Image (cartoon, rainbow, N blue to C red):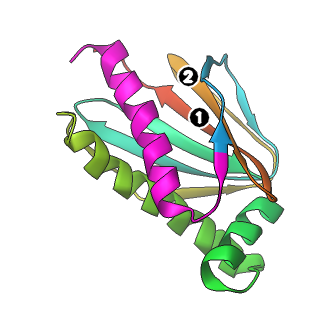
Amino acid sequence: MTLSRNIQTILNGTIQSIKAVIPLNLSYTPPTLLSQPYEVVEMAVLIGIVGDMKARIIIDASSHYFSSVGASMFGMPLEGEMLESFTGELGNMIAGNLCTVVAQQGLEIDITPPTVIVGQSKLYGFQQAFFLPVEVTDIGPMAIILTIDEDE
């Protein structure tokens, strides 16, 4: 597959994975190109992609967003270390599901353990990045960032 086809496969697979993992109504708008640096304002989870493509997925949202998604999935709001742990696990579930979805399209990838980012941070060091806004009904927005680490 070409790099552009791999990127499209990952972005489409990410949307499918989010729909499978988060049991809420969501909508999204088409992805746009993003320039460096990307700024995390409050909380995010970063997961590396290796295999047929080298990239990273960043799921960025407010702590309220992650807590509300946790409450919808587990019946109770999450705070502190439990919220941070859940944020990493949510990223892990989405990325793990992504591996399965894209394998059906012929793209073989694996993921690295999640890295939770808490507080304001700037992310540099990627060749290309795509910004995919996702809105979850009654909770709010989250951003999915796909960074491409190397040309194929």
Instruction: Pick the residue in front: 63 or 16.
Output: 16
Q: Which amino acid does label 1 sit on?
A: Ile
> Where is residue 128 shown, x and y percent of the image?
52, 17
- Is the C-beta separation of discs 2 and 1 under 8 Å? yes
> Where is residue 141 shown, x and y percent of the image?
77, 46
> Where is residue 99 shown, x and y percent of the image?
30, 48
Q: Residue furthest front?
A: 25
Residue at horizontal 63%, vertical 62%?
A: 24
Residue 7 drawn in magenta: yes
- In magenta, the rendered stretch is 1-26
Residue 37 sits in quarter: top right
Secondary structure category for the residue under label 1: strand
Label 2 vs 1, first from the N-terminus: 2
Rendered image: mark on residue 87: none
In the rendered view, does 34 fall on the left or right side of 140? left
Position of residue 54 relative to residue 110, above or below, is above
Q: Quadrant of the C terminus?
A: top left
Position of residue 70 relative to residue 32, above or below, is below
Query: Mark 1 highlights which residue?
Result: 145
Residue at horizontal 61%, vertical 24%?
A: 30
Instruction: Pick the residue in front: 107 or 52.
Output: 107
Rendered image: mark on residue 129: 2
Q: Residues within 10 Å of mark 2 (few under 14, many from 20)?
A: many
Position of residue 144 relative to residue 131, above or below, is below
